[in-house]
Image (cartoon, coloured by chain):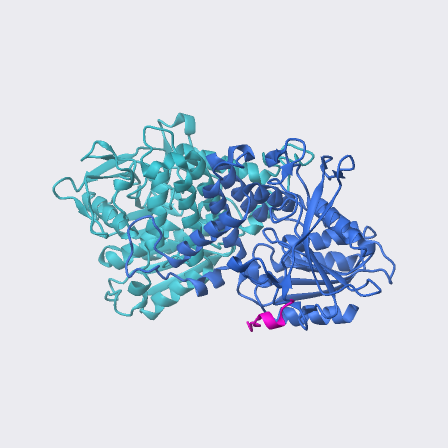
Chain colours: A cyan, B blue
Amino acid sequence: MIETTTSRDTSVGIVEKKYFTFADAPDKLLLESGARLGPVTIAFETYGRLNAQQDNCILLTHAFSGDAHAAGYHASDSADDKPGWWDFLVGPGKGIDTDRYFVVCSNILGSCMGSTGPSSLNPETLTPYGLDFPMMTIGDMVVAQKALIDHLGISRLLAVIGGSVGGMQVLQWCVRFPEMVRAAVPVATTMRHSALAIAFNEIARQSIMADPNWKKGNYYGGPKPDMGLAVARMVGHVTYLSDQAMRRKFGRRLQDKANFSFGFDGDFQVESYLHHQGSKFVNRFDANSVLYITKASDYFDVVEQICTPGLIKGTEASKIKYLVVSYSSDWLYPTYQAKELVQSLKRCGQNVSFCEIEADCGHDAFLIPDQRFTRLIGGFLDGIS
Amino acid sequence: MIETTTSRDTSVGIVEKKYFTFADAPDKLLLESGARLGPVTIAFETYGRLNAQQDNCILLTHAFSGDAHAAGYHASDSADDKPGWWDFLVGPGKGIDTDRYFVVCSNILGSCMGSTGPSSLNPETLTPYGLDFPMMTIGDMVVAQKALIDHLGISRLLAVIGGSVGGMQVLQWCVRFPEMVRAAVPVATTMRHSALAIAFNEIARQSIMADPNWKKGNYYGGPKPDMGLAVARMVGHVTYLSDQAMRRKFGRRLQDKANFSFGFDGDFQVESYLHHQGSKFVNRFDANSVLYITKASDYFDVVEQICTPGLIKGTEASKIKYLVVSYSSDWLYPTYQAKELVQSLKRCGQNVSFCEIEADCGHDAFLIPDQRFTRLIGGFLDGIS
């Protein structure tokens, strides 16, 4: 894999996190479950400028534990001055060229990175929602994104692009608001979770709920279910990697030791790495958000909408142009699932391109700088804009 | 897959669990870590009869959470009257024919199914060992098995056969006591754990150690770390299955419901199945044994012994005959790892046969009745006896 380098000079520069609040009482948002939620705040960032025709907007949809910070740097974030999660892809002259496109990325509903989620204050009780937060779906996330896009005055998106749970949002946009989508790029994703994917999510949830500090979700203000959340993250993290990547990255190398410890502190580098991933996650993410977002991804199922000819409608002119991307070593959402998506879309007469990228780094490949991916996205966008 | 049926009529019948105790003070067993342990009790069962020449003994080595009960029924076990874990393979006229062979299976050191392990009484404190139990290795397990085999008056085994962690014991026998092994059948196993396998084991350990009831292993007599152990088992269980098997067995079917619950009790059948596996395991297995046995399997590494020509010695007449078996959908110990073993053995001039069995049920395939496996083992044994 050829990696691209990311530097401040080629990035969108300093960006600002913004907030949009809607669905205030009494007009709360009606969720798919039938519950109502409001007010809803959506954190978002934008890069580039909306053109006069308002037809150059690209919406990026982030993965499970992602956030609105897709590109550039936060000025205030000097202690943790990392570029956005797709900085290698989004910027002036990059695959998603901010000199040409107006790019929007918003934090999903149910998250804890600025948008309304279980850790937000419940206006009725003035305490965090916890499990009083209503169950929400990928569809609800997309409805909230649409409210933001409406608010920004954009009637049609040039493209919706996202990986993993972000790819589910892309597909949900296509079946829910097809008239608003010119092109869609679902990356490393699936039309619905397999039993294996549900199993790993359920293990993560069980791990959190087994932590006595979880207290049925009512832990805000007290000790947090950090141990359970760390184990949940380790489980998730392993599913994002691959056998090959782990062999290459860690093999059986020992951590700062010449010999086995014959104890339980962790001998192998892969163990320390997992501990590190667990602790890092605990410091930045809310356990209840993991419960809600994993559940939303398990519920997600657009097979019926996508596979039933006629359900995805559109004249030739209004048809969505799809680019489906999978990675060869992704075993969470394997290529065979991407191919099922491609075949279903084709059977329904949709305009679909497909690319499986050879990469040994598993599901996480879409977050790793790769010029092949950058060029693929750039070329695809050239073809529609 | 063609399944064989198992009935009481074709089984070895009622069998009895026996115990062998050795290495009493002051002659404690010296472990690979340098620690000493004793007395050591090994639980075992035998099926068939030792012949006059004492050359028809087959040792079966069990997997991680297995036990000595490989075949037949326990008379006392009316409440849980299940046949042994390889009953489809071991019995009169079966693949491992108890009319011809004297079959021994013993519970591994460190387990909680009758052999000495962390839940056993420490003779020095008269309380359970807990974490005072010394770390032990696959090599130590095999040394304990050899003490039992010596005690039974057997100087050479016709074959050592086992799957998964049992397969590691088979390989350990070959490098440690090659002169005592005529044939070896390592099934669904590896010469050493990959980073992926270590990662899943470490997640299981972290889950147990995160349970506040674990109390650094000192929970005997009080509440047990059941929640952590259940999550650990769920993690392990998923690695024993395969994407295909889970799709076939569960797909996205809901549990007793027509609709989503929009709650966290588990909607999908695969979730209930995992909960069930977790609870079942908690009732039969000791959390500390999981820690010790997973660690032993992570430490296991016979690559150097097997891959260095000359290290596995033997004249033509005394050479071990190997049959290496892997399963096509086993992603915990994938076929590529079995092939590495086969190639290493061949490079060292060993006599090796290899068979990859096409099966979609993942690592657990070796525990599922399959006439192809039964015939393969039977034919191989015919060729050496």
Image quarter of residue B152: bottom right
In the image, is B197 to the left or to the right of A191? right
Task: Please state the extent of the stretch shown in magenta in the rendering.
Answer: B1-12
Q: Residue at x 63, y 42 (%)?
A: B117
State the image coordinates of residue A202 (x, y, percent, origin top left): 41, 49
Image quarter of residue B328: bottom right
State the image coordinates of residue A180 (x, y, percent, origin top left): 23, 55
Is most of the magenta stretch helix, strand or loop? loop
- Measured along the vertical axis of the image, is residue A133 above or below residue B105? above
Q: Nearer the viewer, residue A16 or A292?
A: A292
Looking at the image, can residue A382 be seen?
A: no
Give the residue furthest to the front: B76
State the image coordinates of residue B227 (x, y, percent, origin top left): 45, 43
On whether residue B139 falls in the magenta region, the answer is no
On whether residue B3 falls in the magenta region, the answer is yes
Q: Quadrant of the C terminus of chain A?
A: bottom left
State the image coordinates of residue A155 (x, y, percent, origin top left): 20, 51
Count of labels shown?
Answer: 0
Q: Nearer the viewer, residue B294 or A147?
A: B294
Q: Nearer the viewer, residue B88 or B177?
A: B88
Q: Residue at x 28, y 38 (%)?
A: A115
